[in-house]
Amino acid sequence: MITVHLRYEIDADKLEEFTEYGRRWIRLVEKLGGQHHGYFMPSEGDSDEAFALFTFPSLAEYEKYRIAAASDPECIAAFQYARDTGCIRRYERRFTTPVFE
């Protein structure tokens, strides 16, 4: 199992737009075989940092998701929405292995 941890630097004046972007991707990740654990928005502290977590059964399944997302019309529209609104300044992607009880 692989969990993807995304750290976003967002435009603090565009939280609504970023929230919409996140809502789109929660559904899309699940549509393409992953389990989304949510987006985590700024509350206290830094106002321009947000996070997301989602899991795939394996790195190979994640790679299939990436290939599918590159040609999926809804995914392409979600990427374009982020570009058009400028809600994301940059992001970092990390891969982790979860530990469950």
Image (tube, rainbow, N blue to C red):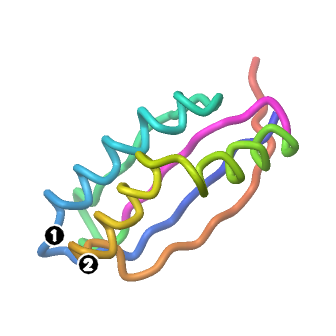
- Say which element carries label 1: helix
Q: Amino acid at mark 2?
A: Gly
Mark count: 2
Q: Quadrant location of residue 94?
A: bottom right
Q: Is residue 78 above or below residue 93?
A: above
Q: How dense is the environment of label 1, judged by Cα within 10 Å: few (below 14), some, or many (20 and up)?
A: some
* Contact check, label 2 and label 1, Cβ < 8 Å: yes
**Residue 97 location in percent, x, y?**
80, 42
Vertical arrangement, residue 33 with respect to residue 80, above or below: above
Q: In the rendering, at what x and y percent does residue 25 appear?
A: 42, 44
Q: CA distance from mark 2 to mark 1?
A: 8 Å
Q: What range is drawn magenta here? A: 50-58
Name the residue at 69% across, 43% down.
Answer: 65
The residue labelled by disc 2 is 86
Q: Residue 58: image x %, image y %?
A: 85, 36
Most common secondary structure along the magenta stretch: strand
Identify the residue under disc 1. 14
Q: Secondary structure at mark 2?
A: loop
The foreground one among 49 and 57 is: 57
Image-based side of 55 in relation to 49, left or right: right
Amino acid type, label 1: Lys
Identity of the residue drawn at 23% across and 50% down? 20
Is the residue marked by circle 2 packed among few (<14), some (14-19), or many (20+) residues within 10 Å?
some
Please tell me which residue lies in front, 44 or 83. 83
